[in-house]
């Protein structure tokens, strides 16, 4: 997790508008609590979130609505990761078209279940 | 005395005759003169249109129906009950009021609600007195949405009230007090037109809401009653109130000074028809827009300034990292789950009780939202030149447009890339959007609104979204879609339902659709699960989640075939199990609508997330527990 990304998340804590409940997401966690939880998590997760040019992007995008632990807790096949990512985007996860492949490839490469 | 005054106003008696009659009734001369003086303005030189009022003689039901007709009502939504007998008698000579029957009071209210939301008119309904509990679920939904409904029922005969008698309670009204804007039991049948007017007025004045009026059956049957019925023109009063000018100027300055304003829109925008003026306001200052939970799409969701729902703000701030410093709430009811203590909050609403109720505001704009928007546009334009406004907002405008375009592109990529068996729900939305008319109506009850807002282009001159209700009590959407189609017969109407939501007693509305040839395509997203409930329970990490036990959400046993349910009502349908079969099935459905019949599309959709693989539920077989095979 680079300092720029951590700084982004810390700024989110200090910004004037906070989200206290993910009222429109499928999960219930407040973003402030989420962000607070994420910072130490992300700070120590540099081992479980393998380093990669895509890592910071994944962390920011995938923490919009739910904790990053969802990723750590999931072991999905490549097909399942793609399906889940497409589902999240369709439900409102804000991602750019150019980031889509980056995020998908990172999840598949680092969190895929053994497909044997 | 009331009759004497009424006769005097109606010019049936002269002033001299009035005074003589008052004297004969033992009133003093001074008292009689005082009464005469008080009504004089109503008698002397009154210049009302000749058809402003008319006298009607008949049964209580006749009086009631005559006044309902004067409101312009075209439909009366009913369910069965012998208490409707007198209404049936009244309708023999009044075929212009079309009955639309439902087989369940709850669905009756849903149909009326959908009709009111789509037409902008008050919905009228009537059910049996004992049907009130059934009706209350959607009455609650209508109250949360402030939908104008007038819901009648019969009531125990007037000589039985208060005796806890057959099919009666001593106080019915207490049960619906939280769900109604007003409620009443009629005790004077000659005042029925007055109570209809009262109910219609209270239901329709913003913020609207359902009202419930109960009429003792003997009053409805009572003959030879005479009452005054008022014409429709007397009942409709323009309510486009303008906001306070000083507050408008204050709000305009906040907006102009803001480095990062945000416009937050809610259902009052749609209810007041303020869409076009709000777009103009947003474009004036390039204010990004977020949609609150709403049964309308209150801002064109494919507009470059439209970000999405609440959680979309984070993504926008990635592109435009300036903290929000001015929050303009247009028609959304707080709380919205945000800490706005360091932000200048401006709230606009027709309902003064809503403003500042949950969140302190820097500026309060009470008025009709279209008037508020126009006033703000005027004030902002007075404070800055067009060139200054363009310069001030150029960076934000360009950034927001680029951001939203890229987000929409990603969503389309995700939808087009979603395929297979079972069908990804987003692929279903994508295919529907490609096939439906550009002015189709989506009536949805499928979880979060983003599932619909992300795929269909809603706008004043485009598609229309109705649903979900703010109340979120399931069992609304199918009936509502029938009501929407009645209001908008020349637009395609599609009802989007989850299998779980459909099973909340909504089959009854298929009966109504079939009887009256109401061509609605009901699309059931059938993932054999109450998906969001499952997520919320299992993700909580409690004992059930830890044990991977889904106690209440699995719907696959029995595995319902919704086309068979529809077939029971003579409604054709199709099951779709693979994304490649979507297009021909949708086309078949649209052909059926064109032929004038409803259609059921049962789409076997994929479920994901926590518990997706689970089919466990607390097993129990009563048959196995028996000691006799009966």
Image (cartoon, rainbow, N blue to C red):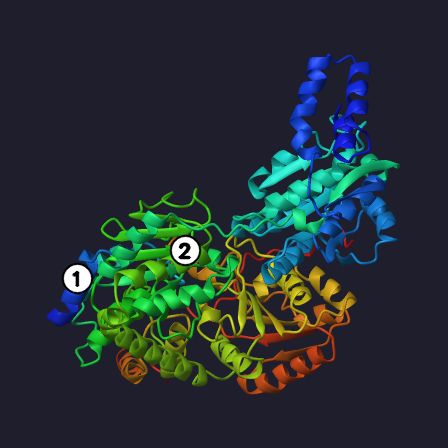
Mark drawn on residue B136: none
Q: Residue B380's spot in the image, x, y percent?
A: 30, 61
Q: B398 left or right of B88?
A: left
In whole angstroms, how far apart are the C-alphas of marks 1 and 2? 34 Å
- When the figure is inspected, residue B586 is found, relative to residue B67, above or below; the finding is below
Nearer to us of marks 1 and 2 is 2
Mark drawn on residue B372: 2
Q: Residue B443's spot in the image, x, y percent?
A: 57, 66
Helix, strand or loop under label 1: helix
Q: Residue at x 79, y 51 (%)?
A: B80
Helix, strand or loop under label 2: helix
What is the quadrant of the N terminus of chain B in the image? top right
Query: Observer-nearest residue: B573 or B270?
Result: B270
Query: Observer-nearest residue: B206 or B306?
Result: B206
Q: How many marks are shown on the rendered structure?
A: 2
Q: Chain of mark 1?
A: A
Q: Residues within 10 Å of mark 1 (few under 14, many from 20)?
A: few
- Residue tagged 1: A11
Q: In this view of the protein, can residue B538 be seen by the observer?
A: no
- When the figure is inspected, residue B403 is found, relative to residue B537, above or below; the finding is below
Q: B116 left or right of B276?
A: right
Q: Residues within 10 Å of mark 2 (few under 14, many from 20)?
A: many
Query: Observer-nearest residue: B54 or B523?
Result: B54
Q: Residue B573's spot in the image, x, y percent?
A: 69, 77
Q: Quadrant of residue B597?
A: bottom right
Q: Residue at x 28, y 51 (%)?
A: B250
Q: Chain of mark 2?
A: B
- When the figure is inspected, residue B492 is found, relative to residue A67, above or below; the finding is below
**Pointer 1 with pointer 2, Cβ within 8 A:** no
């Amino acid at each position: 997790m680079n300092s720029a990304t951590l700084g982004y998340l810390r700024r989110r804590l200090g910004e004037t508008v906070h989200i206290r409940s993910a009222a429109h997401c499928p999960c219930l966690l407040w973003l402030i609590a989420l962000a607070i939880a994420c910072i130490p998590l992300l700070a120590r997760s540099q081992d479980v979130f393998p380093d990669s040019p895509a890592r910071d992007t994944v962390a920011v995008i995938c923490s919009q609505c739910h904790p990053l632990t969802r990723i750590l807790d999931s072991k999905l096949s490549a097909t399942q990761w793609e399906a889940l990512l497409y589902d999240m985007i369709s439900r409102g996860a804000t991602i750019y078209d150019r980031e889509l492949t980056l995020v998908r490839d990172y999840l598949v490469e680092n969190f895929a279940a053994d497909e044997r | 005395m009331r009759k004497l005054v009424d006769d005097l106003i109606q010019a049936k008696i002269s002033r001299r005759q009035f005074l003589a009659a008052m004297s004969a009734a033992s009133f003093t001369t001074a008292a009689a003169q005082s009464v005469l003086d008080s009504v004089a303005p109503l008698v002397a030189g009154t210049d009302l249109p000749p058809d402003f009022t008319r006298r009607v003689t008949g049964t209580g039901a006749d009086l009631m129906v005559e006044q309902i007709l004067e409101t312009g009502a075209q439909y009366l939504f009913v369910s069965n009950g012998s208490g409707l007998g007198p209404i049936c008698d009244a309708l023999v000579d009044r075929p212009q009021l079309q009955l639309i029957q439902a087989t369940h009071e709850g669905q009756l209210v849903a149909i009326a609600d959908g009709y009111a939301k789509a037409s902008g008119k008050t919905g009228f309904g009537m059910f049996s007195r004992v049907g009130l509990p059934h009706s209350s679920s959607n009455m609650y939904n209508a109250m949360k949405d402030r939908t104008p409904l007038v819901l009648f029922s019969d009531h125990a005969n007037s000589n039985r009230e208060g005796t806890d008698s057959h099919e009666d309670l001593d106080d019915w009204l207490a049960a619906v007090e939280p769900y109604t804007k007003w409620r009443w039991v009629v005790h004077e049948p000659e005042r029925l037109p007055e109570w209809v007017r009262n109910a219609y007025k209270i239901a329709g004045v913003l913020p609207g809401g359902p009202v419930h009026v109960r009429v003792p059956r003997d009053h409805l049957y009572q003959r030879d009653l005479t009452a005054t019925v008022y014409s429709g023109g007397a009942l409709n009063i323009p309510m486009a109130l303008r906001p306070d000018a000083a507050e408008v100027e204050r709000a305009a300055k906040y907006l102009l000074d803001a480095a990062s304003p945000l416009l937050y829109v809610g259902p009052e925008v749609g209810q007041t028809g303020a869409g076009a003026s709000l777009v103009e306001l947003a474009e004036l200052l390039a204010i990004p827009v977020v949609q609150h939970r709403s049964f309308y799409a209150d801002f064109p969701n494919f507009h470059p300034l439209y970000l999405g729902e609440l959680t979309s703000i984070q993504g926008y701030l990635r592109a435009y990292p300036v903290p929000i410093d001015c929050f303009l709430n247009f028609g959304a009811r707080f709380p919205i789950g945000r800490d706005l203590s360091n932000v200048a909050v401006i709230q606009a609403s027709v309902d003064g009780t809503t403003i500042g109720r949950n969140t302190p505001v820097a500026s309060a704009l009470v008025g009709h939202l279209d008037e508020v928007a126009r006033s703000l546009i005027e004030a902002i334009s007075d404070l800055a030149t067009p060139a200054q406004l363009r310069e001030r907002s150029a960076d934000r405008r360009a950034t927001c447009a680029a951001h939203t375009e890229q987000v929409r592109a990603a969503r389309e990529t995700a939808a087009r890339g979603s395929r297979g068996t079972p069908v990804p729900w987003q692929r279903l939305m994508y295919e529907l959007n490609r096939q439906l008319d550009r002015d189709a109506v989506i009536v949805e009850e499928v979880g979060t609104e983003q599932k619909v807002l992300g795929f269909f282009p809603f706008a004043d001159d485009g598609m229309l979204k109705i649903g979900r209700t703010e109340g979120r009590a399931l069992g609304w959407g199918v009936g509502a879609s029938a009501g929407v189609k009645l209001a908008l017969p020349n637009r395609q109407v599609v009802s989007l339902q989850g299998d779980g939501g459909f099973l909340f007693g909504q089959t009854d509305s298929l009966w109504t659709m079939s009887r009256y040839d109401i061509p609605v395509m009901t699309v059931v997203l059938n993932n054999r699960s109450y998906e969001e409930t499952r997520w919320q329970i299992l993700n909580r990490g409690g004992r059930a989640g830890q044990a991977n036990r889904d106690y209440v959400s699995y719907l696959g046993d029995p595995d319902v075939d919704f086309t068979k349910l529809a077939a029971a009502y003579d409604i054709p349908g199709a099951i779709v199990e693979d994304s490649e079969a979507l297009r021909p099935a949708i086309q078949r459905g649209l052909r059926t609508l064109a032929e004038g019949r409803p259609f059921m599309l049962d789409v076997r959709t994929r479920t994901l997330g926590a518990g997706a693989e689970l089919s466990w539920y607390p097993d129990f077989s009563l048959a196995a527990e028996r000691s006799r095979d009966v």
